[in-house]
Image (cartoon, grey):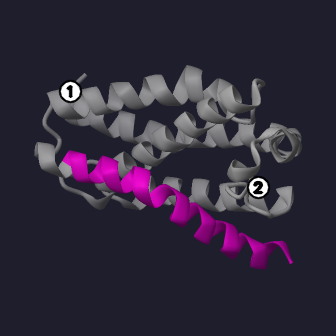
């Protein structure tokens, strides 16, 4: 497969991976929220958003739609198109989420929503995407580093913004 075609396929898989991970989170969210509220140390409970499960699911749907929109209209065929940057940024945010799922499961000593897809799908796929992006030089190294750092850092405030927006949709 040609490099540019492989890049397009990999970048289209980012929102698909995100969707699959979001579906697992949605299915098991209520049980995880209940377990987290009772099983997490008091200092970490402040990290649990005080939102109903319905609002959280709407936020996941909005974020998934945004990921698919970035792929559809982001000119993935272009070596410097918006979609390339958006999907690598999203992949970094997914890695952040996946690591959070693993850490939460260790703290609670039980399964948490999204753990299976985080370990089996998100982390291996993300490692592959980052490895290929480095090997094929999709970006200069400093750009990739900034995208990954931004994806990890802005993941939480971005998602809380989407949660806030989902609150209006849930009403």
Which dot marks residue 57? Answer: 2
* 69 with respect to 92 (left or right): right
Q: Position of residue 92 (x, y in %)?
A: 40, 44
Q: Is residue 84 visible?
A: no
- Mark 2 or 1: in front is 2
Q: Of helix, strand and loop, which mostly describes the magenta segment?
A: helix
Which residue is pictured at 84% across the width and 48% down the height? 37
Q: Are marks 2 and 1 in contact (CB under 8 Å)?
A: no
What element does badge 1 sit on?
loop
As drawn, 67 above or below 11: below
What element does badge 2 sit on?
helix
Residue located beneath label 1 in the image: 2
Whether 134 is among the magenta residues is no
Which quarter of the rendering shows the N terminus? top left
Count of numbered marks: 2
Q: Is residue 110 visible?
A: yes
């Amino acid at each position: 497969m040609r490099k540019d075609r492989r890049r397009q396929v990999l970048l289209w898989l980012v929102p698909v991976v995100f969707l699959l991970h979001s579906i697992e989170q949605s299915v098991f969210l209520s049980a995880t929220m209940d377990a987290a509220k009772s099983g997490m140390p008091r200092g970490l409970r402040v990290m649990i958003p005080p939102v109903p499960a319905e609002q959280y699911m709407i936020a996941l749907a909005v974020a998934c739609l945004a990921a698919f929109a970035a792929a559809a209209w982001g000119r993935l065929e272009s070596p410097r198109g918006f979609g390339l940057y958006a999907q690598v940024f999203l992949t970094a945010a997914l890695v952040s989420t996946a690591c959070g799922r693993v850490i939460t499961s260790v703290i609670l000593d039980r399964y948490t929503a999204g753990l299976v897809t985080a370990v089996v799908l998100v982390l291996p796929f993300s490692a592959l995407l980052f490895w290929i992006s480095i090997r094929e030089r999709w970006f200069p190294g400093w750009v990739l580093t900034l995208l990954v750092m931004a994806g990890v850092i802005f993941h939480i405030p971005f998602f809380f913004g989407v949660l806030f927006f989902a609150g209006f949709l849930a009403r």
